[in-house]
Image (cartoon, rainbow, N blue to C red):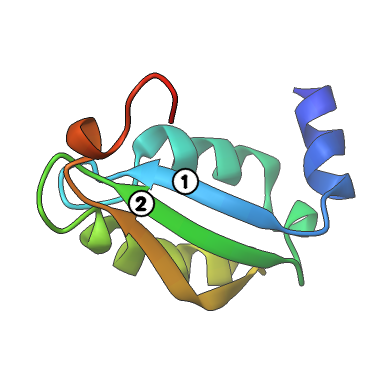
Amino acid sequence: LEEVAELFGAADGFVMVSPEYNHSVSPALTNTLNYFGASRFAFKPSAIVTYSAGRWGGARAAVGMRPFLSELGCLPVSAMVHVHEAAKMLDEAG
């Protein structure tokens, strides 16, 4: 975890990628970010990318992620990427 903390601290910004999980952000992502605390993320830009099996591409997760990242001190960019029907959109080659 110390290595991950160093990586977070050294990063110039973040691309937060999350599946939609019960109409929200992945608990694994929120638990990880909460563990390291706000000081590692303060004043760093963050892009939001979400995906889901449905037609909305995780948009509901993204809506919840924006205030969460703001509370950590990140500066979420306004544009978001939503990958709908992820199993059809992505294959082994990406």
Q: Residue at x 83, y 25 (%)?
A: 2
Q: Are discs 1 and 2 less than 8 Å apart at CB?
A: yes
Rendered view: 54 above or below 75: above
Left or right: where does residue 82 sit relative to residue 49?
A: left
Rendered view: 71 above or below 11: below
Q: Which mark is residue 50?
A: 2
Left or right: where does residue 68 sit relative to residue 37?
A: left
Quadrant holding the C terminus: top left
Q: Which mark is residue 17?
A: 1
Q: Amino acid at mark 1?
A: Val
Residue toward you, 73 or 12: 12
Q: Quadrant of residue 55?
A: bottom left
10 Å neighbourhood of mark 2: few (<14), some, or many (≥20)? many
Mark 2: which secondary structure? strand
Rendered view: 72 above or below 76: above
Residue toward you, 86 or 4: 86
Left or right: where does residue 16 sit relative to residue 4?
A: left
Give me the C-alpha separation between circle 1 and circle 2.
Answer: 6 Å
For marks 1 and 2 on the same chain, the one whose residue lies earlier in the sequence: 1
Residue 79 at x, y percent in the picture: 46, 76
Residue 84 at x, y percent in the picture: 21, 50
Residue 69 at x, y percent in the picture: 54, 64
